[in-house]
Image (tube, rainbow, N blue to C red):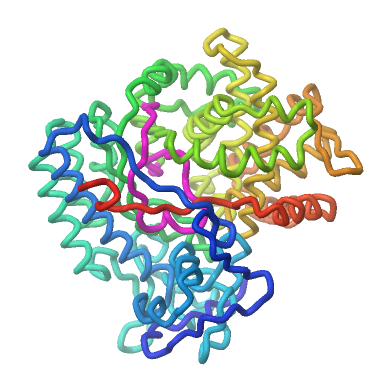
Amino acid sequence: MKKLLFLAAMSAFLFSSCCCNKKCKIKNDDEVINGYARVELTADLSRFSDTDRKMMAYLCDAAELMEKIFWKEAFPGDREAFLNSIEDENLRKFAEINYGPWDRLDGNRAFMKIPGMNGLDDKPVGACFYPADMKMGEFEAWKDENKASHYTVIRRDENGALQAIWYHDFFKEEIEQAAALLDSAAALASDAGFAKYLRLRAQALRTDDYFESDLAWIDAKTSDIDFVIGPIEDYEDDLFGYKSAHESFLLVKDPEWSAKLAKFSAMLPMLQRELPVDPRYKSEMPGTDSDLNVYDVILYRGDCNAGGKTIAINLPNDERVHIQKGTRKLQLKNAMKAKFDKILIPISDIVMDPEQREMVDFNCFFENVTFHEVAHGLGVKNTINGKGTVRAALKEAYSALEEAKADIMGLYMVEQLYAKGEMSGSDVDKNYITFFAGIFRSVRFGAASAHGNANMLCFNFMKAHDAFTRTEDGLYKVNLPQMKEATKALMAEILRYQAEGDYDGLRKWMAEGTVIGEELQADLNRIADANIAKDIYFVQGKEVLGL
């Protein structure tokens, strides 16, 4: 593992706005900027009262503070100096999408020259959570019970020794402002459960103890307005996978679509018991307070807005909450539909067999994503051999494997629910074909993305098990019987790595299993040449929402 190379203070440097490689083609196009399709993020808010709208305005302001903190976590310098140095409007927009000069969908390669910043051509693997000169051995030898906390940054004290600083101290100004805004929003909330959550979340921001607020959020199911805020995911820390980055989502519930999913939460223990894997890998029973609901998302800020956009949420991440209460699984329907229309359908037109191309279906895409999130709550959370939690045992390799598990287990569960008569209205074979077509969308995220690596593991495993064929013209056809068998085999393999906490074995498998072969690369090049967006970016904020 290479040492970190970022500089702790970079405000004095200015940045040029010239691209450093020919792959960076910033297009002067209102619809697509270097691979990102434009989406206006809005929704009909007419059903909400003036008080609700005032509350949402407070939440938007709190979300902007998460945006400010995430820039500090992702980019080792002054955001405004960096952005203001870029004269080209589209290049500046691309830098905003990526939260810095590194392309998150192209292996975090620099797309701008950075004068005076030798060694920063690639994004620091630990982002800005660790000192620039810290070596791996130094960190591992350092004895501090808080060094691996999700909620500390690592810096040097006045004597040069490593020290762990809690987020609420390191980002004190932003945290205090955000907490005060949550208190103000709570005073306006008409839903008692949501108000309780906002008050507890404000306290959690001030203390970095999120357990009680996570429990309260699990119970806050009846509000038609929802808000996720705080340090949530650890994808930004590619060094250890320890540090959670700040983000925020503001959402409004879709009652009609939510009603369709309401019954599945109670079925989670049954789904866990029936997994076709070693009984030791499914002995933990998920909580039944889990929640499946559908939302339109009206604001993304911070980590969730960087590069590829989240289209579903499965939270909290705390394994204690999973066991005690379960998780909430929020499907972001408007963002999901935008990706399906603008990305998946055009990709399918290029790479899928014409007959199966017609079977790529939005309802199936929605079901696959929904049960991907359900699957995060199943399987194993703690190793079976005393290595601690799966997350701790697998370190930075955990996220990609967990995403692969959720992909493949979610697909398996969809088929089981169709077989039991719990789902209807489509042909489950379409789910497999839609899933396979979706791999071409996700592998374009690159090696820097947990989701991209997860999909490459699936693709190469499916290829080795003859789950699909490819013509000389680069058209793919799913072999359904083989794919269904490969799905079960891959699920068992993933759960074995997790249950055993087999870090070394997983690193070896990922090194081999995430390689993009020549044929696939040629097909991805055809997709790129067709100028199909890799992902979406948002026009968003209080003005867009009329708040």
Which residues make up the magenta segment? Answer: 290-318
- Residue 303 within the segment the image draws in magenta: yes
- The outermost residue toward the right is 472
Query: Can the viewer see residue 357 in this picture?
Result: yes
Residue 65 relative to residue 509: left or right = left
Which residue sits furthest front?
Answer: 29
Instruction: Identify which residue, 355 or 100, lies in the foreground.
Output: 355
User: Residue 299, image x and y in percent?
Assistant: 33, 48
Q: Quadrant of residue 511?
A: bottom right
The residue drawn where x is 50% and y is 49% is 391
Tell whether position 273 is magenta. no
Judge whether 354 appears above or below 29 on screen: above
Image quadrant where one finds the N terminus: bottom right
Q: Residue 319: horizontal and vertical position, in percent?
A: 41, 40
Task: From the top left corner, tell me how far across and down residue 377 is, in percent.
Answer: 47, 33
Residue at screen point 30% across, 53% down: 541
The x, y position of residue 66, in whole percent, is 30, 59
Name which residue lies at 58% across and 48% down: 451
